[in-house]
Amino acid sequence: MAVPVVELKSISKYFAKVIANKHVSFCAHEGEVVALLGENGAGKSTIMKVLYGLYGADEGVILVRGRETAIRSPKDAMQQGIAMVQQHFSLVPTHTVTENIILGSTHGRISLKEYDKKIRLLANRYGFDIPVEAKVGDLAVGVQQKIEILKALYLNAKILILDEPTAVLTPQESENLMEFIKTYAAQGNTAFFITHKLKEVMEVADRIVVMRSGEVAGDLKRSETDEHGLANLMIGHDLTPDTKMETSDFPEESTVLELKDVTVERKGEPPVLEDVSFQLRAGEVLGIAGVSGNGQDAVCEVICGACAVTRGEITFDGRDFTAATIRQRIDAGIGYVPVDRYRDGLIMEMTLAENMMLKSSFSRRWTRRGLISRKILSDYTWGIIRGHQVKATGPDEQAKSLSGGNQQKMVLAREIDVGQKIIVFNQPTRGLDMGAVDRIHKSIREEQQKGKGIVLVSTELQEIFEMADRIAVMYKGRIVGIYRNGELTTEQIGLLMAGYVQKEGAQ
Amino acid sequence: MKQKYLDVLLFNVGAVIVGLVISASMLLFMKINPAEVYTAAFLKIVTDQYTLGEVLVKSTPLIFTSLAFAFTYKANLFNIGAQGQFYAGSIAAVSVSLALGDRIPGWLLIPLVLLAAFAAGGAVGALIGLAKAKCRANEFLVSMMSTYVVSALMDYLLRTVLRETKREYLQTDPISSNAYLPTILPGTRVHLGFVIAVVSAVLIWVLLYKTELGFRIRAVGCNVNAAELAGIRSQRIYVITFLISGGLAGMAGLTEINGVQHMLLQNFNSSIGSFGIGIAILANGNPIGAIFASLLFGFMNLMGNTMGRLPNLSIPASIIDFIEGIVMICVIISYFLRHYLTDRREKRKLKKEGTPA
């Protein structure tokens, strides 16, 4: 067998308090697509960041083309022809596409016209349709990703690492990306592809490295395995099959929340929300489907009060809530699990106990004679930790030292308590492993059964189908339709999400 | 937890020693034996009761100005204007003391002066907070410039209504002895203000860590988005925080006017504001730590004065600024070193255990 292009030998990486990788070894050959499959926190991104020189390995060696190589920085990596497209892009929004691509690899006088031509040629070679003179900030996320890839290709990368590349893409864009990866590998290059989506792995990978808890749990050829086998390797045990929801009808009298022609506009921008109307009934899960960035965040923020309404009305429990403050809404029983727990959900530098009192700091339930009672707070937090099986040492642990799934459980527990009437979940399972997803879905169902109204925003159709009674599809700030679960097929909803308005009778 | 506090103590003491050693090299260049000078100054301070008392006197206003900075720091705000708020407090303290000094007894007067000093400093602070909340002004710049405004105002008042009856210097008449903060240690100048300062520091700690308001302030400081989503109005927090912070700095006006100077002088104590910032950083923003850090700086300040006054040696006063600066840098470096070492210790522990988390 030929010498592998890249070989990782017994790499270990420690962070304070966490082992990210433990004796990880695998290799990749020319022309191969290697998928790194694993739950979040399994260490896939970390091992690739070690290869790309963003992290230094604490143990182990990296062999590039058979030779032991020290990769201390991305610059070293690029010299070896290794490039990485990160989950969060590193582009300058106010610069043009060309400027972004040549950034860092050009000196002296720059003739932009020439570079424009060069970049256009390069883009065409891979079938990318990109306006090279446009400002990056004006372009869609899918295009921005292509720019990141072009950046790597421009530097003549022979080994390309893609970190969860499809998370931000529409199904159609994802397919294009898969095509590209295949072409790229066919030209004798190597691609690493980090993902936790089984379907993508089966579609594009030649070899699959499954990671679990920082270790390699399996290293197989695609032909040797199937989705079921991979899933078992990933989580270490069998998943309970999803039971399809029994959907039921809810009478109109049980409406707890109503949005009527809600529009949110900011000066000089297309409306974030346009005439959004829906009713949420008690005991119902209303799923909001759509490609990320089509106004779902705004809907959530309008409900919980973080975003002011330009026009329209919000009625909650029979009262006009259009102009209610966030605090009034919390007091009224509206819970909100935000999409970005780092930014909006938790205060990472504070303890778990302090995070638990965050939303009820006005309620006086934590104080005795005006002073915060450590005991009340810590008893409560222990209750949450045990009740939701949070892996934490105790109430005094800092939120940031928990894993993502456990952090999310803490947020969820708090919001379930706050949201006595309705709870808004904005992509509650994004980036979590299957075990955590399972538990979170269970919690949502429990709250639903208690008669709470639930709004569930998700970009994963699978999740919507599994959880929702009704499905609202959003596209460019509008709700293009609300359907009972089961009324539409995946393909139909996919088309709606992509902006194809359904015509009567058209299939 | 125990280990942590021990580390903090060890690293800070170590840093001070290292700082002193480095500064010693400067004395060597001047052909002065540092060991001798340090010992002489140190002995003078610890053996002479009056001088030892001066450590507390010097540190009293520093506790207030460092608290002022530390308090806003917890809300991720920067109050660079403690000097101005201190002046505002001083103007209020001297005005109230002059106006009421002979009319009401001391036990009633002192609390009134305290309130006035707090209110004056607090008003300046609240204005900065309002500018931040309502106009999104940069509080760093506004608070910094506010010092110049207040000091100009003080100048103006000293030239007009507050000017001494002799009309000779830019200062006020001395206040009535009725309004003096009582001395608490006989044979020294240590006055009640030191106790007020320590109590204030403790109260600020309680406010920050034991009350809901303090929790909200810290929440806004750590993550303003999450705090807003939790119904906390950050703008209101900005104003409240700056009000309290300014009030604290204003209280230094009480201790300096009624405790030490007994009159208002032009541009007096002109560097306690900036020292407060350094001390607060040294104390890592902890109110209780601010007491000790202030004592350390009071001590070093006095050490400098004493060294300057040692017979037969002519040590320039500026050398103490140098020593203070070096010690400060060492302490800040030790802060990062401590974190680095704790991190490494955790890692090594993990390696030994060897099971993936």
Image (tube, coloured by chain):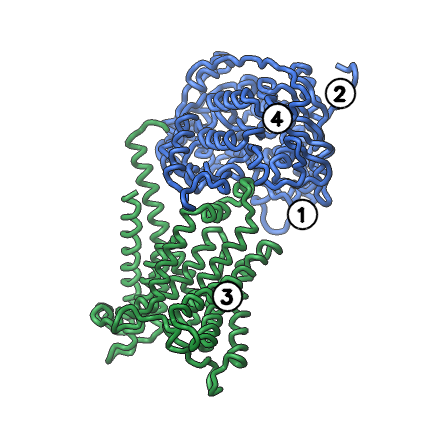
Q: Which residue is mark 3?
A: B120
- For disc 3, the chain is B
Which residue is more in the foreground, A181 or A63?
Answer: A181
Q: Which residue is mark 4?
A: A177
**Circle 4: residue type:** Leu
The colour applied to the residues of chain A in this rendering is blue
Quadrant holding the N terminus of chain B: top left
Label at residue A111? 1
Residue A159: percent from left, percent from top: 52, 30
The outermost residue toward the right is: A504
Q: Which chain is green?
A: B
Comparing labels 4 and 1, the label whose residue is closer to the camera: 4
Comparing labels 3 and 1, the label whose residue is closer to the camera: 3
Above or below, A9 against B316 in this view is: above
**Residues at marks 4 and 1 on the same chain:** yes
Above or below, A35 against B14 in this view is: above
- What's the residue at 42%, 27% (across, down)? A7
